[in-house]
Image: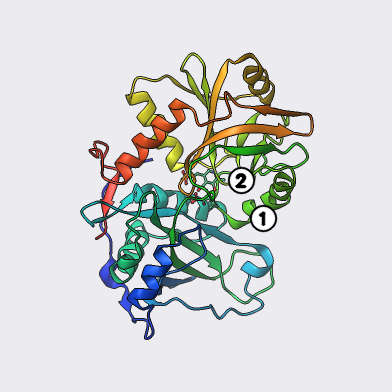
Amino acid sequence: MTDTATTSNAGAFEVRPNPAPTSAAARAEALADLRFGVQFTDHMARMQWRKDEGWNDRRVEAYAPLQLDPAAAVLHYAQEIFEGLKVYRWEDGSLHLFRPVANAERFNRSARRLAMPELPVEDFLGSIEALVAVDGEWVPGSEESSLYLRPFMFASEAFLGVRPAHVMDYLLIASPVGPYFPGGVKPVSIWVATDYHRAGPGGTGAAKCGGNYAASLLPQQEAYAHGCQQVMFLDAREGKFLEELGGMNLFVVRADGTIETPRLTGTILEGITRSSVIQLLEDDGKKVVERDITLAEITAGIDSGDIAEIFACGTAAVVTPVGRLASESFDVTVGTGDAGSVTMAIRERLTDVQYGRADDVYGWMHRVG
Ligand code: PLP
Ligand code: COI
C-alpha cells in the first residue's frame, strides 16, 4: 500500500447545492447525538460510467433517494463494491483524511475482482474533496468523532443477463459518526462461527463487496443471539485458522509482548488500519508476526495465560479490545476481560496521528479543509 500524494480533480465536479439544507441549529443537534451510520449530510457526490464512454457526469448534489430501474443488475447479481474512510477534525479546525490513496487503490482492486471499471484515483479523491467542500461543517469536533465517508459503485444497467454491466454508478455519501460500538471503547464479545464461512479460496474475500457482508449477516445474527457483538470467521478450507471479523481485522498479543495477526491469504480484507497498526507497532520496537493462527492455539493460549490480549481493528471500529471469545464448544475470557495495555496504547498511537495530536511522520494524513 502506498500513500503517494495524488492530485484530485475536485474542480471537475459540478455543484448543485441542496435547495433546503439542514439548518445550523438542526445540524448542531444532530452532531450532539452521534451513533454510527444513521445520519447523513446534505449532499452526495456522484459519477456515472458507460462502456465505451468511461466516467462522466461528475456532480455534487442534494442527498436524496435514488431512482433505480427494477432490472438494475445490482439488485439481482450484487455487482457492488464500497469503501469506508473518515474525515477527522483537528483541534485547529482543519480537516484531514487518513491514507485515502490506499482506499482508492483497494477500491480498484475490488473493482477488478467484481469485473467493474476502475475509478481514477484523482476522481476518488476529487469526489471526497468536492463533497467535503460543501458539507465540511458536518465533520464533528467532539472527542473520537469523525465524518465517515462511504464511496460505493454499483451496476445500474437495466439488464437481466448475467454479465458485467455496461452502466455503473459511483456515489459518495457521508455520515457524522461516534464510536461503532455503542458505549465507547469497551471490550467486545466475539462469536466464532463454525458452520458458516465468509470467504473461500478464489472467492471475493479480499474485495470489499456488499455480497461478503450479506453472507456474514446470518452468523452475525447467531453472534447476537449468544450475547456477542461480532462474529469471527475461520478459513473455509480447513475450518481451523483465524481469518477476520465481519467488518474488522484481528490481532493477538502474547504475554511475551509478541503480536500476531492472520497473514493475508486472499480470503481476508487487507485492512488499512491493519497495515498501519503493524507499522506503528514495529516502529515502536514490537515484534509483529503475520502467519496462519489456529483457533486451537488461541483458546489454549487464553487458558494458559500465554495470550494476554486480543483486539480488532478497522476504520469504523478503530482499535477495539476483545474481552470474550465464545462458540458452541467454549466460552473464554481474554486476559482479565478488560481493555489491555498494548491494545489501548496502539489505539492512542493511531488516533493521535489521525487527530493531529502526533507528528505525521509517515505522510499518512491528507488535508481536505
Ligand atoms: N475486514 C473487513 C471485513 C472490513 O469490512 C473492514 C473494514 O473496512 C476491515 C477488515 C478493516 O479495514 P480498514 O482498516 O481498511 O477499514
Ligand atoms: C469500515 O470499517 O469502514 C467498514 O467498512 C466496516 C463496516 C462498517 C462494514
Query: What residue is at 32 percent from the left and 25 percent from the top?
Result: 283
Query: What residue is at 69 percent from the left and 52 percent from the top?
Result: 217
Tell me the distance, in whole angstroms, between the alpha carbons under discs 2 and 1: 10 Å
Residue indicated by mark 1: 214
Query: What residue is at 58 percent from the left and 78 percent from the top?
Result: 68
Location of residue 287 with respect to 349 vertically, above or below: above
**Badges 2 and 1: C-beta atoms under 8 Å apart?**
no
x, y (%) of residue 48? Answer: 45, 72
- Kindly give the residue lying farthest to the bottom in the view shown: 19
Disc 2 secondary structure class = loop
One can see residue 57 in this view: no
Disc 1 secondary structure class = helix
x, y (%) of residue 154? Answer: 55, 66
x, y (%) of residue 15? Answer: 32, 78
Nearer-the-camera pick, 121 or 90: 90
Q: Residues within 10 Å of mark 1 (few under 14, many from 20)?
A: few
The quadrant in which residue 223 appears is top right
Query: What residue is at 69 percent from the left and 68 percent from the top?
Result: 76
Residue indicated by mark 2: 246
Check mark 2 vs ligand 1: CB closer than 8 Å? yes or no.
yes
> With 282 as the anchor, is 324 left or right in this view?
right
> Residue 107: which numbered mark, if any?
none
- Kindly give the residue lying farthest to the left in the view shown: 92
- Where is the C terminus found, in terms of image quarters? bottom left
The amino acid type of the residue labelled 1 equals Ala
The quadrant in which residue 177 appears is bottom left
